């Protein structure tokens, strides 16, 4: 970082920029001695230019709290914080390409299950913040379209990755739902598109949980993300959110009927970050569905381990040339 004179040269998760008195800071810089890492003097001129870009994005009668900005050939998600000391811009780089599941670190043994023809219902990609959940969701959409064709439509408050385009006989359309409309309204617009695959923003609240559970039995594949520490925790969190509106029994019944699976992922903290995954499949898994109906989510971890062992054994039995 000492030699860098432009923000685009750096690898980081978030940049906290523009506070009137506090220094600009970069989070999660590989190999850095501190986290967050203070910006060096060599970056000052470029940081000032980037701050001007952020301020310009807020000009107008309805300044957005979150938006997309571009500087020096790089696009960023910008979130504006109004702190006690003044305005701060939180910037996160937007990826330029959709990587494959294999490139992301998803085990080859899981790929047939994630791309199987006819998969429908709600599929959740779970993990901590900044663990690559959206990247994995986009990769699933891309690879399914490439293999099977069809139409995919996304509903995103802010479009994160460039997924729109043709893939084999399939096509994906990305839509920005905006932050002003509620989840239910935005979801209705996307669901009315007739798409075979729908990808939505993170499930964060009661409204979102009820919407996705009710839609999970409509015959198409619905992909979304959640923050959770395991597949079982994601399912428990989904039930808790939905139960506030429709009751625990109804929420469990909808999950048992419509949940297709959960992929939990975790990035290792080493300099060379590796992806650790846990896959739980609910289609054609009567034992797992029974646990969903009774709320015995603690038993799902053993089911997932058994399923993953079977997938790995099956992959090992297939000659490499046939994969």
Image: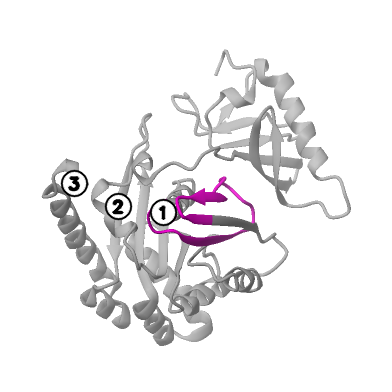
Which percent across, then down, holds residue 14?
Answer: 58, 38
Label 2 sits on residue: 111
Queried whether the magenta region covers residue 253, the answer comes back as no
Which percent across, then down, holds residue 12?
Answer: 53, 32
Q: Residue furthest front?
A: 169
SS state under label 1: helix
Queried whether the magenta region covers residue 146, the answer comes back as yes
Q: Which residue is drawn at the image coordinates 76% and 26% (left, top)?
A: 48
Viewport quadrant of the N terminus: top right
Label 3 sits on residue: 322
The crowd level at tag 3 (other Cα within 10 Å; few <14, some 14-19, many 20+) is few
Res 19 quadrant in image: top right
Q: Give whichever of discs 1 and 2 has the lower sequence position.
A: 2
Which percent across, then down, holds residue 293?
Answer: 31, 82
Q: Is residue 55 left or right of residue 138?
A: right
Q: Is residue 250 left or right of residue 163?
A: left
Q: Is residue 206 left or right of residue 314?
A: right
Label 1 sits on residue: 140
Q: What is the spatial separation of the Cα atoms under label 1 and label 2, in whole angstroms?
A: 9 Å
> Looking at the picture, does residue 9 appear above or below residue 248?
above
> Looking at the picture, does residue 234 appear above or below residue 133?
below
Q: What is the spatial separation of the Cα atoms under label 2 and label 3, in whole angstroms?
A: 14 Å
SS state under label 2: helix
Nearest the viewer among 17 and 287 is 287
> Looking at the picture, does residue 26 appear above or below residue 92?
above
Color encoding of the figure: one colour
């Amino acid at each position: 970082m000492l030699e860098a004179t432009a923000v685009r040269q750096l690898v980081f998760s978030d940049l906290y920029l523009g506070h009137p008195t506090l220094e600009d800071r970069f989070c999660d810089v590989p190999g850095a001695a501190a986290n967050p890492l203070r910006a060096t003097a060599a970056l000052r001129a470029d940081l000032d230019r980037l701050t001007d870009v952020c301020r310009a994005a807020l000009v107008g009668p309805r300044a957005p709290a979150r938006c997309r900005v571009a500087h020096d050939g790089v696009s960023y998600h910008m979130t504006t914080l109004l702190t006690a000391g003044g305005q701060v811009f939180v910037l996160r780089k937007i990826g330029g390409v959709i990587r494959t599941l294999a490139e992301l670190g998803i085990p080859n043994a899981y790929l047939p299950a994630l791309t199987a023809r006819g998969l429908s219902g709600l599929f959740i990609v779970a993990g901590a913040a900044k663990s690559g959940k959206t990247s994995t969701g986009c990769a699933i959409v891309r690879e399914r379209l490439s293999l099977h064709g069809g139409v995919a439509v996304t509903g995103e408050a802010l479009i994160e990755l460039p997924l729109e385009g043709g893939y084999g006989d399939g096509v994906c359309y990305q839509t920005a739902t905006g932050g002003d409309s509620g989840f239910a309204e935005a979801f209705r617009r996307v669901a009315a598109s007739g798409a075979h695959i729908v990808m939505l923003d993170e499930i964060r609240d009661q409204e979102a949980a009820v919407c996705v559970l009710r839609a999970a039995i409509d015959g198409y594949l619905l992909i979304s993300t959640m923050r959770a520490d395991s597949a079982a925790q994601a399912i428990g969190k989904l039930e808790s959110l939905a139960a506030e509106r429709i009751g625990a029994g109804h929420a469990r019944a909808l999950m048992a009927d419509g949940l297709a699976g959960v992929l939990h992922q975790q990035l290792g903290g080493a300099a060379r970050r590796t992806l650790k995954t846990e896959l739980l499949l609910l289609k054609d898994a009567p034992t797992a569905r029974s646990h969903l109906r009774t709320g015995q989510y603690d038993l799902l971890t053993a089911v997932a381990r058994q399923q993953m062992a079977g997938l790995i054994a099956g992959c090992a039995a297939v000659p490499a040339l046939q994969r």
